[in-house]
Amino acid sequence: MKKKIIIVGAGVAGLVAARHCEEAGYQPLILEADDRAGGRVKTDLVSGFSLDRGFQVLLTEYREVQRYLDLPALQLHRFQPGALIFSAGRSFQFGDPLRNPAQLWSTLIAPVGSLWDKFKIWQLTQELSKTPPEKLFEHNSLSTLEFLQQRGFSKRIIEQFFRPFFGGIFLENELQTPASMFCFVFKMFGKGYAAIPERGMEQIITQLQAPLTHTTFRYNTRVSQVLNDHLLTTSGERLDFDKVIIATVPEALVPGLQGQQRAFRGTYNLYFSANFSPIQAPLIALVADADNPINSFCVLSEVSKNYAPKGKNLISVTLKANTDAAPATIAEAIKTLVKRPDLELEHLASYYIPQALPIVEELRYEIPNTQYALTDRIILAGDHLLNPSLDAAMRSGRECVDLLMH
C-alpha cells in the first residue's frame, strides 16, 4: 500500500516536492491556505495590468531555476544590466560595459564612485565567477557592509549603488545581511540576467504546477496543527498521514516549535499607471537619497510590454525598508525625481508583504538531507532552511523528498 503523503503549502518548495513525490510513484495531497498555488510568487490582474505581489525578478543563473523551469517557454524579458541612479537632484546611468560596450563611457564618467571602485567591481565579478556557489556560504561572519568596506569600496559607491541596490534585494537598508548572501547574489547577477516572464512572475508557478497530474490540491485549507501521524485544519478536520512535508514556516504548526517565532523582512510595493514612460529603458532606478521614501522603481512595461494594456505604462515602486507613505506622496516623489511635472500617475494597487523574506540565522547553500527531518514522519522544506532565494526553495523541495524516500 502506498504511503499517504501530505504537503502543507503550495509555494515553490511544495510544488517541487510534489513533482518528486509523483516521480517516486506517490500521489500527494497539497493543502494550501490561499485560493491558489504560489506562496510568495503571485501576480494579480488589475485593470489589464499584471501586478506581481512585491517587486520580483527571476535570476536566470540559479542552478535550480535551470533545472526545473523551461526558460524559453516563459518568454523571459531581461532587465538591462546596471542601474539608473538618482542622487541629489541628478541622475546617472551605471551600466555593465562587459555586457554592453556602448555603456563603457557613460559608466566611466558617471559620478557613482571612483574609477578605482569600478575596477574593484570588475575585479570582484571576475573573482566570484570562478567560485562555486556552495563555497560562498562557508563563511558567514562579515556583514555585507563590512565586506564592502574591507574590499576597499568608497563610501560614495556604497551609498549610491550598493545600499539601494542590495538593500532592495535584502529588504534592509543597513546591509547587515551576511556577505555570503551578497556574494551569491552578486555572482548570479554577474553571470546571468534578471528577468521577468512575459505576463508576470506567477507564470513560474503555473509552469511548476502544470505537470502535477497525480497531486490533489485543496485550496483555502489552513492547517492549525501538525502532530505525529495526523494534522488538524482550522475547520476541525483531521487528516491522517504516513509522512508530511511542511513546505511553509513550521513554528506555528508543530507543538514542540510553538513560541519560536521566526523573523521576516517585509516590503511595501506600489503600482502606478503612467501616461508615458519616465525611463525609456528596461532599467532599475535606484534612489540614493536617504530622506526619499523610495528605494527603487522601474517601468515594467519597458521590460515586458504585456505587463500593461496596449498604450499604457506600468511603474513599480519599492519603498525603503520599514517605510510607509501615501500613494499621492510617492507619485509626487517620482515626478520630482524624473523632473517631469507632466507625468500623470494613477495609483493601481499597494502591497504590504510582511513576510517577504525569512531572516535565516545561519545561511547555507545546501544541507545534508537528514537535516530536513523534524521527526521520522515530519519533514521540512522551504528557503528558510538554507537562504532566502527561489534557488533554495527549489533545492529544499527536491532534497526533502530524497529523505522521504529512504
Image: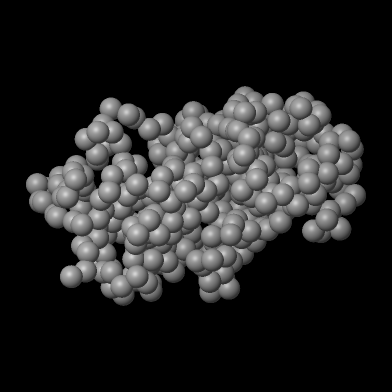
Residue furthest to the front in view is 406
Figure quadrant of residue 41: bottom left
Give 155 or 183, whichever is nearer the viewer.
183
Residue located 26% across and 69% down the image:
27
Q: Give x and y (percent) for residue 381.
A: 38, 50
> Is residue 399 visible to us here?
yes
Residue located 31% across and 59% down the image:
36
Give 386 or 323, whichever is nearer the viewer.
386
Q: Dividing the image into 4 quarters, which one contains the N terminus? A: bottom left
Give 334 or 218, whichever is nearer the viewer.
218
Q: Give x and y (percent) for residue 222.
A: 21, 48
Q: Dividing the image into 4 quarters, which one contains the C terminus? A: bottom left
Q: Give x and y (percent) for residue 302.
A: 63, 59
User: In the rendered image of this protein, does residue 340 appear above or below residue 19?
Assistant: above
User: In the rendered image of this protein, does residue 65 appear above or below residue 248?
Assistant: below
Query: Relative to 281, is 23 on the left or the right?
Result: left
Figure quadrant of residue 163: top right
Figure quadrant of residue 171: top right
Residue located 76% across and 27% down the image:
150
Query: Relative to 233, is 335 on the left or the right?
Result: right
